[in-house]
Image (cartoon, rainbow, N blue to C red):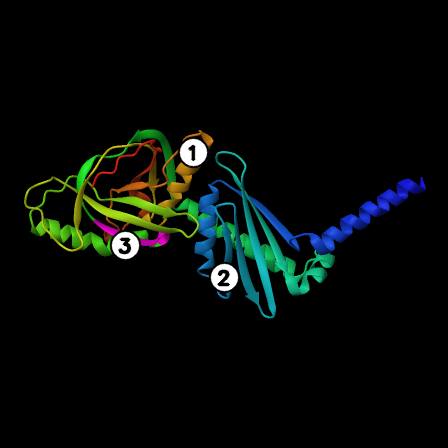
Amino acid sequence: MKKGLLAIGVILCIAAGWYLFIKPSDYIINFKVKTTPGTIVQSIKSWNSNLTASTITEQHGTSAIVQERQFGDSTVTYSFNVYPLNDSITKVSVGVKDAEHSLKNRLTVPFTNTLFKDRSTANAMDFYETLNQHLKEIKIEVTGIEKTPSTYCAYISLKSMQEAKALGMMRNYGYIGDVLTRNNVEMNGPPFVEVTEWNQKTDSISYNFCFPIIRSENLPITDEIKYKRLFTKDAIHAVYNGNYITSDRAWYALLAYAKQNNIEVDPKPLEVFFNNPNMGGNAMEWKADIYMPLKQENPVKVD
């Protein structure tokens, strides 16, 4: 009997020691969302950019991101851990820690509402509501494996962060179109973006903003505009509706589809845009075909 009580006492002491001094967070908030981990991580960064005294300090792919926020004399860390539960639902676990007042928080959180607990819950729910509003403003439908377009095109090579891709398109849309129109170049379809490099750790991309054209012998020569033929490839295809600033949400949906179906892909998306963002309008009526090329064993590079 005494041994049993002693064992229980030891277990309780270990549990209390872990909770008070080792547990990574003072308080945890959990919620589930119908979207991909990549969309959640990108949305956290977008939400964070609109906050005051808030910084993203770490990111671990699409599985975790750490936010540091300042409240008076307190520096509070929000660790967002993202877990896909199935092909459509993702769990988000937000661990909150105030290093300067950690012991006090751990002693009070289980028993009463405190400023720390209420503020942590409110901030996590603010992101949850922001994310759900964003998801209402986009639509993504993965349709399976299809062929990418094949065309000759005029293009400009650009580099930017993912969220600045649409801005690069808008800045160059009129310029490329004007040069081609003035020189009587015949268009051959809607413009598209060919991503040539995607650094998923830094969210930076290199891409070609392309206008499909009919090839001729008298194409205009400029320092910026180049020409090439784009050859067809097998790719996973999705239809995206929404603001083109966040069309990269479809990239993550395609990567998730590839993982679920054991399909190897080359993470260099191709996006075909059927609307001109410069014309405005209801973004939910904007459409883009998004392709994630399948990995090729011996890809052929053609200039």
Residue displayed at 60% across by 60% down: 119
**Is 30 inside the magenta-drawn segment?**
no
Q: Give the residue type that dot 1 points to.
A: Tyr
User: Which residue lies under the disc numbered 1?
Assistant: 257
From the viewer's perspective, tell me whether residue 119 is left or right of residue 284. Answer: right
User: Which residue lies under the disc numbered 3?
Assistant: 168
| Sequence-wise first label, 1 or 2 | 2
**Is 157 inside the magenta-drawn segment?**
yes
CA–CA distance in space, label 1 to label 2: 31 Å
Q: Is residue 270 in view from this perspective? A: yes
CA–CA distance in space, label 3 to label 2: 25 Å
Image location of residue 11, percent across then percent down:
81, 45
Q: Quadrant of residue 116?
A: bottom right
CA–CA distance in space, label 3 to label 1: 28 Å
Q: Considering the numbered disc 1 on the image, is that residue within a helix, a strand or a loop?
A: helix
Number of on-image labels: 3
Residue displayed at 85% across by 47% down: 9
Vertical placement of 202 versus 288: above or below?
below
**For the stretch drawn in magenta, what is the main secondary structure?**
strand
Q: Give the residue type that dot 2 points to.
A: Thr
Q: Give the residue type that dot 3 points to.
A: Gly
Magenta region: 156-163
Image location of residue 38, percent across then percent down:
45, 45
Q: Residues within 10 Å of mark 2 (few under 14, many from 20)?
A: some
User: Which residue lies under the disc numbered 2?
Assistant: 55
Image location of residue 32, percent across then percent down:
54, 42
